[in-house]
Amino acid sequence: MAKMTKAQREWRPGQPKKPRSTRVMFASTVLSLEAFVVLFATLAIYGLNRETLNPVLIIGSGVLVALICILTCALLKKPLGYAIGWLLQLLLIFSGFLITEMFFIGAAFAVTWWYAVSKGHAMDVESARRLREQAAWDAAHPESDSGTGVAQP
């Protein structure tokens, strides 16, 4: 039998599920998509500049940046993850010096990153407010079944 995780060992029946952060989900999606864009841009840079730039340097740095994009997703529960995310946005914009189109693609991803972080945070704040209000209502109305409006037998 597989080992249980800490969360699985500590779970008890009836225990409320911890809400997931919308900001983390949005930001992870943007970074994952950016990893693909970085890989495709790496192939384009390699194809256009293989005589002038070292191919190992081009492919290696592109794969490294794509891996950093993916690994940053794991850090998004801490402020460091968002700082690295902003640095990745700048790196993607500055890659426009290698391929001009990346200025536009990088700017579009930077706007998408900003939107994911800001709106995701706003949605998390709203979800937390609703959870507090639901908990207060449940405490004030113990005879109903967890806010469904159906009385328990």
Image (cartoon, grey):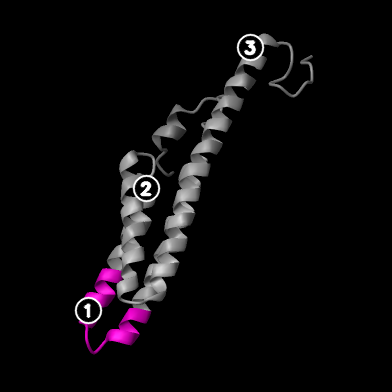
User: Residue at horizontal 31%, vertical 54%?
Assistant: 87
Pointer 1: what residue? 56
Q: On screen, 115 above or below 102?
A: above
Q: Magenta stretch containing residue 147, yes or no? A: no
Cα gap from disc 2 to disc 3, whole angstroms: 36 Å
Q: Magenta stretch containing residue 55, yes or no? A: yes
Determine whether the residue tagged by mark 3 lies in a helix, strand or loop: helix
Q: Count numbered badges in the picture.
A: 3
Q: Residue 11's spot in the image, x, y percent? A: 49, 28
Amino acid type, mark 3: Ala
Quadrant position of the C terminus in the picture: top right
Quadrant position of the N terminus in the picture: top left
User: Residue at horizontal 32%, vertical 47%?
Assistant: 83
The answer to whether residue 14 is seen in the rendering is no
Q: Residue 63's spot in the image, x, y percent? A: 31, 69
- How packed mark 1 is, by other alpha carbons closer than 10 Å (few <14, some 14-19, many 20 or more), is few
> Disc 2 or 1, which lies upstream in sequence?
1
Pointer 2: what residue? 74
Cα gap from disc 2 to disc 1, whole angstroms: 27 Å
User: Residue at horizontal 42%, vertical 38%?
Assistant: 4
- How packed mark 2 is, by other alpha carbons closer than 10 Å (few <14, some 14-19, many 20 or more), is few
Cα gap from disc 1 to disc 3, whole angstroms: 63 Å
> Disc 1 or 3, which lies upstream in sequence?
1
Give the magenta-colored segment's residue range.
44-62
Q: Left of 14 or right of it: where is 43?
A: left
Disc 1 + disc 3, Cβ < 8 Å:
no
Q: Residue 32's spot in the image, x, y percent? A: 44, 59
Q: Left of 20 or right of it: where is 67?
A: left
Task: Point out which mark residue 139 bears.
Answer: 3
